[in-house]
Image: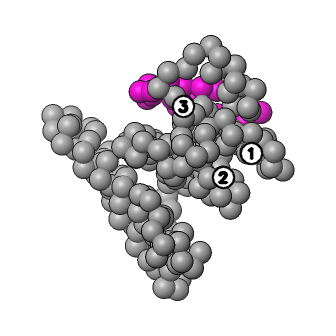
């Protein structure tokens, strides 16, 4: 979605609220698409339903925070606390919205906290505001490509704490060498293999 002059003039808090709310809605849209393709797979339907319930709760929390309602006290089970402790904040930067949102849905189903952006500049802004544990960065984004994003991240005082994973439709040996030189810890080709991805989401350095 291209920012209009009206959206650019919004206060920072409002822009962040709209951005986060749109991410929740986009993830729910990807979830409904998965439901349509998984009619004969009850286990997937159950996971997607749980994810969509979480998305609704996150949207309610966003609205409450925006209008100033304090969050309700929650009673967490030991299992819930353990899951939340292992959850990673993952920033996905990819100008292919469908691919990014589908990946975010899979990560949410795995208990992580993905955030989606569609250009490199916005990825740098969000990473600076709240450094993620992991970044999955498409190499061929327009305006600011993945190589430049990685170099900018590594130049920050907190940059070495982020695990950077390069994502591309085709990774030639030269691309892999350039990605490593730019600061990426790992690389993966599209479509991403969801069976091997969890093993790549380990803390950097």
Between residue 84 and residue 75, name the one nearer to us.
84
Q: Residue 74: x percent and y percent?
A: 49, 70
State the CA–CA distance, disc 2 to disc 3: 16 Å
Mark 3 and 1 residues: CB-CB less than 8 Å, in contact? no
Residue 72 part of the magenta-drawn span: no
Q: Residue 142: x percent and y percent?
A: 54, 43
State the CA–CA distance, disc 3 to disc 1: 17 Å
Q: Residue 53: x percent and y percent?
A: 33, 59
Give the number of the disc on residue 152.
Answer: 1
Between residue 142 and residue 153, name the one nearer to us.
142
- The reply, left or right, for residue 72 in relation to residue 44 is right
The quarter of the displayed image where residue 57 is located: bottom left
State the CA–CA distance, disc 1 to disc 2: 8 Å
Tell me which label, 3 or 1, sits earlier in the chain. 1
Secondary element at image label 2: helix
Work out which residue is located at the far left of the displayed protein and give it: 40
Q: Main secondary structure of the magenta part?
A: loop
Tell me which label, 1 or 2, sits earlier in the chain. 2
Between residue 4 and residue 196, name the one nearer to us.
4
Give the number of the disc on residue 167.
Answer: 3
At horizontal 81% and vertical 45% (from top left) the residue drawn is 155
Between residue 61 and residue 102, name the one nearer to us.
102
The quarter of the displayed image where residue 104 is located: top left
Work out which residue is located at the far bottom of the displayed protein and give it: 68
* Mark 2 surroundings within 10 Å by alpha-carbon count, few (fewer than 14), some (14 through 19), many (20 or more): many
């Amino acid at each position: 979605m291209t920012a209009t002059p009206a959206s650019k003039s919004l206060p920072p808090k409002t822009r962040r609220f709209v951005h986060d709310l749109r991410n929740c809605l986009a993830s729910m849209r990807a979830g409904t698409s998965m439901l349509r393709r998984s009619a004969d797979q009850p286990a997937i339907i159950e996971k997607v339903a749980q994810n969509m319930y979480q998305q609704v709760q996150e949207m309610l929390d966003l609205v409450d925070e925006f209008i100033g309602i304090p969050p309700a006290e929650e009673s967490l089970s030991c299992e819930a606390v353990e899951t939340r402790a292992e959850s990673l904040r993952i920033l996905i930067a990819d100008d292919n919205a469908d691919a990014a949102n589908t990946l975010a849905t899979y990560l949410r189903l795995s208990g992580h906290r993905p955030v989606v952006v569609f250009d490199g500049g916005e990825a740098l802004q969000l990473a600076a505001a709240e450094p993620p544990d992991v970044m999955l960065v498409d190499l061929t984004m327009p305006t600011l490509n993945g190589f430049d994003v990685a170099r900018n991240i590594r130049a920050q005082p907190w940059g070495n704490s982020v695990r950077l994973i390069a994502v591309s439709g085709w990774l030639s040996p030269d691309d892999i060498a350039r990605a490593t030189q730019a600061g990426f810890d790992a690389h993966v080709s599209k479509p991403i293999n969801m069976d091997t991805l969890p093993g790549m989401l380990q803390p950097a350095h």
